[in-house]
Image (cartoon, grey):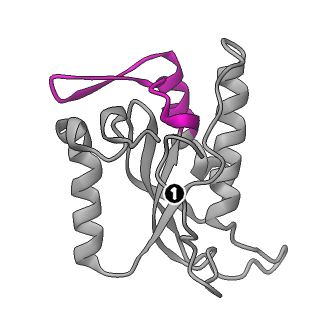
Amino acid sequence: MEGLPQRKANRLKQYDYSRPGFYFVTVCAKDMRCCFGEVIKGEMILNEWGKIAEKFWKEIPKYYKGISLDVFRVMPNHVHGIIVIGDVGADIIRPYKRPSISQMVGSFKRVSSKAIHITDNNFAWHKSFYDHVIRKEESLDKIREYIINNPLKWKLDKYHPKNTIIR
């Protein structure tokens, strides 16, 4: 896609993305459009669309058994968050299948887009999303710190429009 870094396959081959664990996810607006608000003096100020994205991100656990959220942040053109898939075991009455990260992110993108389209039909999410399976406590701590401090370092962020290579 023009103007955006070349995408590469980021999924681990033969990895079950519904396994219990911590997953770092980044979901971007199409064409890196800054449409969720702005960073002012190191603080993210959400606009109407940003508040919609935040609302539906927070609601992910309401729709998926055994899912919780760790830190997350809505930025001007993307959302960073850590999704935790818990080990809920087997449900005797109804066998339970854990959702995958792709199912949850797809659902988030679908419902948030639908809500945003009520005010403006020109919004779209980027086709895919970035994910990272967090395997070590020290990685979890660094990712949490990155997400929390993202507004303070916004001008240096690779998702900042001035840092995106236009070809």
Identify the image quadrant of residue 150: top left
Q: Could you tell me if residue 110 is visible in this image?
A: yes
- How far from the left and from the top, in percent, is residue 112? 64, 33
- Measured as percent of width and height from the top left, residue 114 is found at 73, 28
Report the magenta residues as a range.
Answer: 29-56
Placement of 159 over or under 119, stated as above or below: below
In the depicted structure, whether residue 46 falls above or below residue 84: above
Q: Is residue 150 left or right of residue 103?
A: left
Q: Secondary structure at mark 1?
A: loop
Based on the picture, tell me whether residue 75 belongs to the magenta stretch.
no
Report the residue marked by disc 1.
Answer: 6
Report whether residue 65 is seen.
Answer: no
Residue at x 58%, y 42% (from the top left corner): 59
Q: How many marks?
A: 1
Q: Nearer the viewer, residue 77 or 8?
A: 8
As drawn, 160 above or below 65: above
Q: Please identify the quarter of the rendering in which residue 18 is found.
A: bottom right
Q: Position of residue 101 (x, y in %)?
A: 61, 64
Residue at x-position 69% and y-position 51%: 106
| Observer-nearest of 166 and 81 | 166
Q: Amino acid at mark 1?
A: Gln
For image coordinates 17% across by 37% down, the residue present is 152
Name the side, left or right, on which 141 lies relative to 63. left
Above or below: residue 24 compared with residue 93: above
Residue 8 placed where, x, y %? 55, 66
